[in-house]
Amino acid sequence: MTFLIIGATSFGGGVVAYLRNALVTKKKWLDDDHFLELMSISNTLPGLNATNMSILAGDRVGGTLGSFLAMLGMCVPGFIFMTVAGFLYGEQGDRPLTTAALRGVAAAAVGLLSATWFSIGKKSVKGFYDAFIILAAVLGVNYLKFSVPVVLLAVGALSIFIHRPAKQHPPEKDSEWIRFLH
Amino acid sequence: MDQIPALARVFAYLSLLTIGGGMAAYPEMKSLVVDVHHWLTNEQVIHIYSVGQMAPGPNMMMVAAMGERVSGLAGAAVAALAFFVPTGILTFGVGRLWNKLAGWPWRDSIQKGLGPVAIGLAVAGLITFGRGSITGWVTVVIGLAVFTLTLQTKINPALLILGGAIVGVVALR
């Protein structure tokens, strides 16, 4: 039920913020650490954060059924909205007034999405390698015209390799350093 | 009606590319929907995607509107199911496995490694999208205004998109 309300009221994206407010602050079904952990799973897997989060949180709160209902609640209002929008677009989309409005909407969407990814980037880009990976993905898709899955696999593999698990440093290193000081 | 299996295939495939968000799949979606299957024009894809930013719930539910344009109500249902169910099942399964993987050192590597890839793919999607929708000085002004307002204030994004529509009606007719 909660998810249905979020699904129906979370206009304009940023569903994750709505979810955190409802699940952590209001209902106290999850604590903050738990929420962040689920968030990191959602980010790593394909699929949208909004639905991935609903599925994971629904599972923690109410098992398989909870997970299913959470996903359903999240999706149904938007589905109705967009199906009707698609229908209306077919009926009215060619009018000059509609076209003008939609061109304004598209320009606003560019601004909104740029701002969203700008904040994410500012928070999460650490160091040269991350910047290099971002650049490689952009060049691969937009200028070298590779398809998205090719870039995802190639750049993704490279990036995971860069962040590969550090080798266990043998503890002798420290004592060597201490000996050197003496 | 004969487009239904193709719709299911295309949108299920696209859903697997949405690492970090729907924008990552945008360039591939444009090429499949516009160039390969000729379901919509580039302009129509941009319009539908933009309206999706106002919809309640996940923004990528705009796949329902694309499905609707191709095959009516059945198309809408098929596109939405194909887009949300396979990744949903994947997430459900991995969510249960995740804690068991806690000791696996590559788990952190995958997580850290995919972060910048997701950002890169989103920026690439945004460039593809922007090339079609930023077409003159009015659209540049709208885009910059929304960008600044989103970062500096807490106005609901849906209202900013609606504002874009109003400016569009006044200035782009």
Image: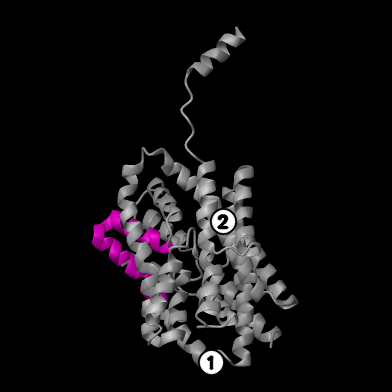
Identify the element where label 1 is drawn. Answer: helix
Q: Main secondary structure of the magenta part?
A: helix
Q: Coloured how? A: one colour
- Which range of residues does the magenta coloring cover? A50-78
Mark yes or no: residue B156 visible: no
Residue plotted at (63% across, 64% down) = A142
Give the x, y percent position of residue A56: 34, 56
| Image quadrant in which the N terminus of chain A is located | bottom left
Up-down relation of residue B113 to residue A51 (above or below): above
Q: Is residue B173 magenta?
A: no
Identity, as a three-letter code, of the amino acid under mark 2: Ile
The disc label shown at residue A92, or none:
1
Task: Give the x, y percent position of residue A114.
Answer: 62, 63
Residue B119 disc label: 2
For this rendering, which residue is in front, A176 or A55? A176
For this orientation, the residue located farthest to the right is B137
Q: Does dot 2 land on a helix, a strand or a loop? A: helix
What's the chain of the residue with tag 1? A
Residue type beneath disc 1: Gln
Closer to the camera in the image, A120 or B89:
B89
Q: Are marks 1 and 2 on the same chain?
A: no
User: Badge 1, how many Cα within 10 Å: few under 14, some, many 20+?
Assistant: few
Disc 2 packing (10 Å; few <14; some 14–19; many ≥20): many
| Label 2: chain letter | B
- Picture quarter containing residue B103? top left
**Residue at the spot 43% in from the left edge and 70% down from the top edge:** B57
